[in-house]
Image (spheres, rainbow, N blue to C red):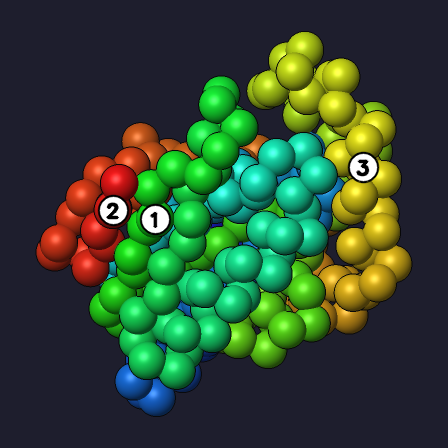
Amino acid sequence: MRPSADLAPLADALSRAVATASRAGRTPVVLIDGPSGAGKSSLADLLLADWPAEGAPRLVRMDDLYPGWDGLDAGSDAVGRDLLAPLRAHGSGSWQRWDWANERPAGRVQITGTEPLIVEGCGTLSRRNAALADLTVWLHADDALRKRRALARDGATFAAQWDRWQAEFDRFVAREDPVASAALVLDVTGLDLTPTAPRTARVGDLTDPVSGTTVES
């Protein structure tokens, strides 16, 4: 990760968390949560490109597994139940893809091995999920900036669903209090999160037996 006084605490925390998990013989798990447009995806891309710890990180985006616009809670539950809990217990977990275009489940992605895993997206930091992670991160950003970022990225489709999704996220926050589960809270409003190198493929973009990731259709 390129030097930055603002992100230095994150780099230090990641290095410690990965080292501790590796010594314990488990897959280091990093969860990144925060409201839409806060910069979760950008930060995850930056970590993939400029990883400040040992290992070669893998990435799961919650956007790929929510079962539709009303699926935040279902996605949050599923990532803990199907991926994080079995990964911690047995060293292997999975997650179910969602085909947004056809509104139905797609292939299931299997994740094994001890290389670090990043999961980013709204709803990652439920209390149950946070207990299965080695580092938990919450991102803050200016509300007006968040909306501009999110709509610039996802366009008219998200614009029509913004209020619906925000209401669902607000209910999640009220119930789970994810900030209280965050080991690190970062305000990234003014930060440049552009990676210094091209991002690598996220988990599920391809079948990679070397990294322990397989995709079942």
Q: Residues within 10 Å of mark 1 (few under 14, many from 20)?
A: some
- Measured Cα–Cα span from mark 1 to mark 3: 27 Å
- Residue 34, how many percent across, how many down? 70, 48
Q: Is residue 97 left or right of residue 74?
A: left
Residue with the mark numbered 2 = 216
Q: Which label lies toward us, 1 or 3?
A: 1
Please name the residue shown 25% across and 46% down the image: 216
Please identify the residue farthest to the left as the structure is shown.
210
Can you give x and y, in whole percent of width and height, for residue 71 in the image?
65, 43
Viewer-side residue, 193 vs 94: 94
In whole angstroms, how far apart are the C-alphas of marks 2 and 1? 5 Å
- Mark 2 and 1 residues: CB-CB less than 8 Å, in contact? yes
Which residue is tagged 1? 108
- Residue 163 relative to residue 178: left or right: right
- As drawn, 101 above or below 178: above
Secondary structure category for the residue under label 1: strand
Say which residue label 3 marks: 166
Taking depth in this image into account, of 10 and 209 the one nearest to the observer is 209
Identify the amino acid type marked 1: Arg
**Which of the image's four quarters has the C terminus?**
top left
Q: Is residue 24 above or below residue 171?
A: below
**Residue plotted at (84% across, 28% down):** 163
Q: Amino acid at mark 2?
A: Glu
Q: Quadrant of residue 192?
A: top right
Q: Nearer the viewer, residue 116 or 107?
A: 107
Specify whether residue 164 is in view: yes
